[in-house]
Image: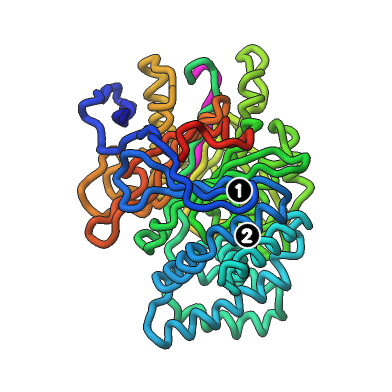
Amino acid sequence: MVYPLFLSALLVGLAVTAAQTPNSDVADVSGFKKLRSWGESSLYQIEASTKYVVNPYLIHLIGTKYDMGYAYGHLLAKEIEECYYTLMYSLVGDDLKDKVLIEVLGLALDWQWRDYLSIEVPPQYKMELLGLEYGARESGCTMCGNYVKRSIVLANAPGDLKDYIYILLREFEPAVARLLSNTTDELEPTAGLQCSMFAVWGSRTEGGQLFSGRNLDWNKDTGINKYKMVIVNVPKDSSYPSVSITFATLYGTIAGMSSMGLTVHEANLEENEISFSGFPWTLRLRYIMENAKNIDEAKSLWEDTNNTVGFNHMIASAPDAVNYTSDQPSTVALALETMYGYTAYFPDNDQREADALYPQNSTGQHFGFPLKEAVWRTNHGYDPVIRKHFEWSQSPSSWSMQRYMFIHDALVSYDAVSQKIDYTEAVNITSIAGDKGKHPYTCEDNTDGSNVISVTFQPQQSILYAAWESGAGDTWRPGVCSTYIKLDMKDWFEGKAPSNNY
């Protein structure tokens, strides 16, 4: 069954009816077609009525960390290689000199991984990546291990290429870094990562349950939407199963949910105190999911590991939402504003956010509007230290601030009409915040926007709603205007495929 997505009422109090919705859908899964297996792990294609030319894959990985890596590489070697080069050709070009440049950049990424970003990766994940390398080699891709590691480095890079200089300044003598920085000025900068995330619970939601959402607004129409991926990890050790929404070569967690009911999220935060001497975030978020069963444990794990480049992150916990009461409120979700060597933690209704001014003086304009029982972020911060090192605009008219207000306004609007947030409302909030062009409340028939992944989590029920960009060229449409596929993860987390697989 396909459910319509409806818009939230605006602050002026005008309720928008279901008949005035954009053309986003939530689709149920009709089946999972098994494509191939290795050991206890299997690769499936999701079958559902969607707008995608190629429906997403789901890979169910069961075993030791090495076994899960081996299965991923063995079962997806072709897709990993194709996805990597599709992305690189889109970012750099595909003529002869571009292909040479891609190989040179690949060597630079290998060096950054080997000498810096891999150093603080826990041994179990290094073993998993080794398994991936060997499994892919068995399937004929001798470089797939490198492609995955390069993608982890790319995901960890700052949103603006010119800001890579701050990493080089930590790795080299300043004079060498200045020389290298002259090269970046001649290259076309990549699009800044413009993401969003939110969590809501308590009196705002149906049954008090936690809902959370995450948008990846990135380089659109690169061609990698042919390799849409749901990765389910069921480790045979003491760690918890988890699911990650991503693309084949972007290994790790772009957005995810654990069997314990924790969800993890990311949005770029362009800081100038950055380094590659830390835990790469796509693996760090999975580490949090696999080892924490509540928000306190997640925070403790975060504090025991090190930041790299500036990012906003969010961790939300369904177990804490279950125990939450309005007369004795507790922390259910945290926004983490991060840069190298520093993290600022923000629960709901934080006073620092409420007091934030732009400019940062007595005549400034308020631009923070926190609420009880909700946490959200886009691509700017509110902690004074984070703001001091921020590289992008903090103006109340910035695109980041506008998207921050889209989420705020949706939450306030539902509250104003006494509408409890259930999954349709949560998907709606996610969809509104994702970049779809000039009109946030409308999915128009054009190629505007940059949203490539959009996902809403209902972690108490182990359910998620995932959408990816669709089409190509003139038919490209953002993920938030494509089809959200409803996935119940309970059986997958228990190590078994649902009954409708074949």
Q: Position of residue 402 (x, y in %)?
A: 39, 44
Give the residue at mark 2: 309
Residue drawn at x 52%, y 37% is: 376
- Front-lying residue, 84 or 196: 84
- The numbered mark, 1 or 2, whose residue comes first in the sequence reads 1
Identify the secondary structure beneath mark 1. Answer: strand
Residue drawn at x 25%, y 25% is: 18
Quarter of the image holding residue 73? bottom right
Q: Is residue 226 magenta?
A: no
Q: Position of residue 252 (x, y in %)?
A: 60, 53
**Residue 364 in view:** no
Instruction: Measure the C-alpha gap from mark 1 to mark 2.
Output: 34 Å
Q: Is 62 placed left or right of 376 in the picture?
A: right
Give the residue at mark 1: 41
Q: Type of residue at label 2? A: Val
Residue range highlighted in magenta:
196-204
Q: Is residue 203 magenta?
A: yes
Q: Relative to 325, is 157 above or below?
A: below
**Residue 246 in view:** yes
Q: Position of residue 297 (x, y in %)?
A: 75, 35
Quarter of the image holding residue 168? bottom right
Residue drawn at x 54%, y 25% is: 461
- Front-lying residue, 252 or 357: 252
Q: Position of residue 414 (x, y in %)?
A: 39, 22
Identify the secondary structure beneath mark 2. Answer: loop
